[in-house]
Image (tube, helix red, strand yellow):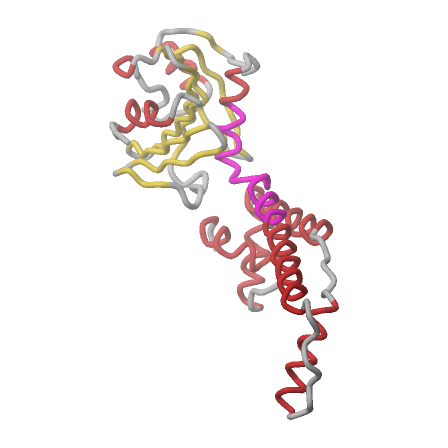
Amino acid sequence: MDCRAYQECVAAHVDGALDPQERDEAEAHVRACSACAELRAEQEEMKATLRASAARYPLPPEVRTRALRALDVAAGVPVEPRRPGFLRQRRTTWLALVGAAAALFALVIARLVTAPGDPLLSALAEDVRSANAGRLHLEVRSRDVEELRAYYRQAGFEFEHTVGDFRDAGWSVVGATVGRIGKVRTTLTLYESSTGKIICRRFLVGTLPLPPGGERFGDYAVYSVGDVTIVIHRIGDVLCVLASTIPRAEFLRNVAGVDL
């Protein structure tokens, strides 16, 4: 079982719904993969939170009365005439049920929206927010692309495409550092433009699982985490991941040539 296969069955794993062979494969994968172990822990935490905080709504007495009445009718037992106001009571009952269902649905949605997301997307969103707040640590500050490429080579990144030159898009490089997502080391380069800062992480294909979902624009996969837009693109054996709070339409136009 690889990371992508585990991501597809993690909910069933947490719910105990896998067959014995699948369960054994999932357990073996989680023991060997810290990223998927963290994903399972997040799913377990979310499930526990929902179970603990989900509201319990008692069945209104009117619903029980109506159910018994319907059973009597089906059995041919004489039924007393409805009292005045029955329709009003029925409407009130259904409104109460609808309100209860809406409240529970809102709770579930709120938990899902605020639940921890994919490790890669979460890391990129935090990078962008740190950069915007001036809290992002850079090992090397330089506007020279070649100097930053040399820094990454010295840090052990042997692949060719460590730093992109985005001057045509109006982005100037600011600096670089070595990042990490789980056990995977990545390049982390900061750019800036007239409308905002851009984070670029690069790593070899296959070293990190790609996030599920997202939108596809040609060769580009696009994700959103709050106000952060994240674009993933493959360059040979390297994945280039760009993230920014620059307005989405402008960002996609500059990165992928997409006009929304």
Residue 252, above or below 219? above
Query: Residue 193, how many percent across, how many down?
Result: 37, 12
Single out the residue that lies furthest toward the front.
84
Count of number-bearing discs: 0
**115 and 28: which is toward the camera:** 115
Residue 29, above or below 200? below
Assign the magenta stretch its main secondary structure.
helix
Quarter-wise, where is residue 154 in the image?
Answer: top left
Residue 117 is a magenta residue: yes
Side (left or right) of 37 relative to 238: right
Q: Which residue: 72% across, 75% down?
A: 65
**248 and 67: which is toward the camera:** 67
Single out the residue that lies furthest toward the bottom.
76
Quarter-wise, where is residue 34 in the image?
Answer: top right
Residue 95, above or below 164? below
**80 and 117: which is toward the camera:** 80
Residue 20 is a magenta residue: no
Magenta-tinted stretch: 106-127
Query: Residue 70, how many percent across, how many down?
Result: 64, 81
Side (left or right) of 235 relative to 71: left
Q: Which residue: 56% across, 60% down?
A: 12
Query: Residue 157, how many percent across, how many down?
Result: 41, 24
Residue 209, above or below 13? above
* Quadrant placement of the C terminus: top left
Side (left or right) of 156 relative to 180: left
Query: Residue 218, how many percent across, how many down?
Result: 25, 38
Q: Which residue: 30% across, 12% down?
A: 170
